[in-house]
Image (cartoon, helix red, strand yellow):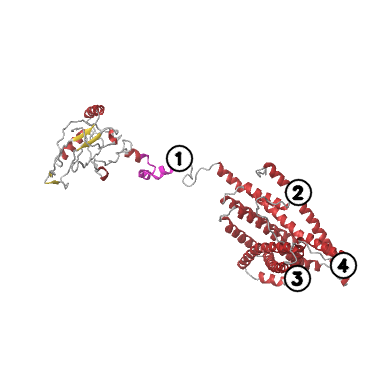
Amino acid sequence: MALKSGGRKLSFDILNGDVFIEDEFVLYRSLSDPMCENGETRKKHKKKKKKKKKNVNLTAIDEDPIADKIVDDHRHNEFESDDQSYKVETSLRTVHQIPEQEFQNFNQDLQPLVELRQRTVKLNVPSNHLDEFSAKEENDNNNNNIVGIGLISSSAQKSQLNGGVVSKLGTAESLDWKRLIAEDPTYLASLEKSPVNFFIGEMRSGNTLRSTTILGNDKERERVYDTIFRLPWRCELLINVGFFVCFDSFLSLLTIMPARVLMTFWTSLRTRQFQRPSAADLSDWSCLMVLISGVALLQQIDISLIYHMIRGQGTIKLYVVYNVLEIFDKLCQNFGGDIFQTLFRSAQGLATSSSEDMSFCIWRFVSDLALAAVSSIVHSFVLLAQAITLSTCIVAHNNALLALLVSNNFGEIKSNVFKRFSKENIHSLVYYDSVERFHISSFLLFVLAQNILEAEGAWFGNFVFNALLVYVCEMVIDITKHSFVAKFNEIKPITYSEFLEDLCKQTLDIQPEDGRKKLTFIPLAPACVVIRVLAPVYAAHLPYGPLPWRLFWILLLLAMTYVMLASLKVMVGMGLQKYATWYINRCRKRKHHLHSD
């Protein structure tokens, strides 16, 4: 090959970035090449600059570990002079190691087909690299077991020398295709294994579920134990405390509220002076009026008629009826809480209003009171229908109760678990479950009253079993629901401890700093249902006799009931306050709301 100094430089990584070539390489052309005609190569007659030629021996480059070296490089370049620009066509191909005899036969067969044209090669090579190339060329000439014939043509290698960039050639390791394919796990040769070898390879490959599972970390392990152990305990503790808060409010309505009304009325009679009532007195009077109106209207309902109407329906219809009533229960509970908050606000405005705004405040208070009475009565009807439906399922002998509990509870899981919840929404969901737990207890009390009035034989054992079944199913569903809601929404168990702290502060009437959500429960509707249910039980056990005698027994039973409810109220209230005080102090000491449970 010829070497000529000067001119533009063409860089190849194959020459370690230091050798620059402007050359015309040898190119093999077959007879079928369009550039050939009648076995001879057509030559373009163009003007070419005279160049000084200098021979340089280029050594072969190790392209393939399987083929040791490249013996010969044949390159062909066509130069076109147009404003000192040149077009270069380079090519390179590596041929793997073949025996010497086969290579000679290959050359003999190849000579009639191609014509070897040697063009000048212009290199701008430092002298030290020329020495290296000469030494490598001498080593390659001594090794006659390897042949290199180059032919690579691509559009990326057809660039102009005045600023064009030639794409990098692969290194020896990147061109070792056999080794790369052998190391490829998706190599098709693996499919050619026998079934026995494939099965043995699968047994020795490691984890059986490696393709569908990944290794967990400590965080995943903590999440598993939170879902199974830590969160259910805290969730059930929070729901139970919320249940007792609702029960305390219910007992306050039946004991504290009548006592406050009687004291206010007695004070007015004793002093014979009418004073403007306070906001608390107006709230008590409004609650008493709503309670009396609700009980009076529920007394007009024939429970036996509704019971037989619901009992005549099939299991599927019972399921539909119970779910519809449960939806209305949620709506009435949410809307009723807002209405009574508005009523108490109007009572406070009426108690503190001036004489000029008195008429407006009275009109607003009366309208809010009427709306509260209507919403409470509607909610009472919904709860009574729910209690009758549950009683029908318990009394039925076709496993209707079990079907109702399974379908309703798992429907509740479906509607809550697979949804996204924020922290505040989960807070509200826990409080609703506490209220629902109290409503179920009032339903079971209704069933007990109905069994006392109508059941025959040994019914108490069956009632206890069904009551426990209902309560345990509700508890399991609530725990499962909150465990997976917390898991899917990445809620830590410590969050439920924070909810419990807020509930304890609400019990002690401590205002939260950030105005967090409180447990809202209006016990008027459940109280109307309980009084409506227990009234026939008291009437059935009154002794027969003259009217004064019956009135005496009525007052005696009412007094005994009030004393029992007041005692229960004292125990529940004091227990809640003691527990709330202990828990808040514990949280203040630990600061992180961590339990040892």
Q: Which residue is mark 3?
A: 296
Q: Amino acid at mark 1?
A: Arg
Q: Residues within 10 Å of mark 2 (few under 14, many from 20)?
A: few
Q: Which residue is mark 1?
A: 204
Q: Is residue 27 left or right of residue 165?
A: left
The answer to which image quadrant residue 285 occupies is bottom right
At numbered mark 2, what does the secondary structure look like: helix, strand or loop?
helix
Q: Does residue 38 belong to the magenta stretch?
A: no
Asked if residue 447 can be seen in this view, the reply is no
Q: Residues within 10 Å of mark 1 (few under 14, many from 20)?
A: few
Q: Which residue is mark 4?
A: 552
At numbered mark 1, what does the secondary structure look like: helix, strand or loop?
helix
Disc number lying in front (1 or 4): 4
Q: Is residue 403 left or right of residue 104?
A: right
Label 3–label 4 contact, CB within 8 A: no
Q: Does residue 185 belong to the magenta stretch?
A: yes
Asked if residue 354 can be seen in this view, the reply is yes
Residue at the image point whose x is 87% and y is 72% from the top: 547
Q: Amino acid at mark 4?
A: Phe
Given residues 391 and 130, the one toward you in this image is 130
Disc number lying in front (3 or 4): 3
Label 2–label 3 contact, CB within 8 A: no
